[in-house]
Image (cartoon, rainbow, N blue to C red):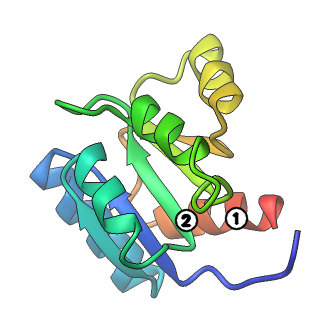
Amino acid sequence: MSESLLEKIMLVEDEPDIQAVAQLALEAVGGFTVEVCNSGGEALDRVAEEIPDLILCDVMMPGMDGPEMLSNLRSNPDYSTIPFIFMTAKVQPHEVAQYKEMGAIDVIAKPFDPMTLAEHVREIWSRDH
């Protein structure tokens, strides 16, 4: 893959408290620009406006969940290569394997440590790029 910088992250999360903590962790600690979306549907609408460098997405959300959103992204040639990380409490080995089979580059377990979230995202990004 080409060497590129990770600057812009789309965070897709329906829980306001988790949104706030993750956004603060990624912006203040990590120095990223973060765009927050409340659902998979909203994220798909907004990804067309400005393609993020990476998508960090919850699995369980009302309406369109994370796996359905990822499936939609992967089926569209314009967005099929956006790196995608799930952030979820559902991290049994068979679940993680399933997410990766869907096209996620990795999974971050909830609850996450806000002080190390940005570094964890960077580590995953560097393995993929």
Q: Determine the secondary structure under disc 2.
A: strand
Query: On the rendered structure, is 96 left or right of 116?
Result: right
Query: How packed is label 1: few (under 14 Cα within 10 Å), some, or many (20 or more)?
Result: many
Residue at 18% across / 45% down in the picture? 14
Pointer 1 and pointer 2: residues touching (CB < 8 Å)? yes
Question: Disc 1 vs disc 2: which is toward the camera?
Answer: 2
Sequence-wise first label, 1 or 2: 2
Q: Determine the secondary structure under disc 1.
A: helix
- How many marks on residues? 2
Up-down relation of residue 69 to residue 114 (above or below):
above
What amino acid type is highlighted by mark number 1? Trp
- Specify the farthest residue to the top: 94
Up-down relation of residue 109 to residue 101 (above or below):
below
- Specify the farthest residue to the right: 1
Query: On the rendered structure, is 27 left or right of 73?
Result: left
Residue at 57% across / 73% down in the picture? 53
Q: Nearer the viewer, residue 70 or 8?
A: 70
Residue at 40% across / 69% down in the picture? 48
Q: Is residue 109 shown to the viewer in this render?
A: no
Spatial separation of the CA atoms under disc 1 and disc 2: 8 Å
Residue 92: give its label: none
Q: Which residue is mark 2?
A: 54
What is the x, y in percent for residue 123?
A: 70, 63
Q: Which residue is mark 1?
A: 125
Residue at 32% across / 31% down in the picture? 65
- Specify the farthest residue to the left: 16
What is the x, y in percent for residue 122?
A: 64, 69
What amino acid type is highlighted by mark number 2? Leu
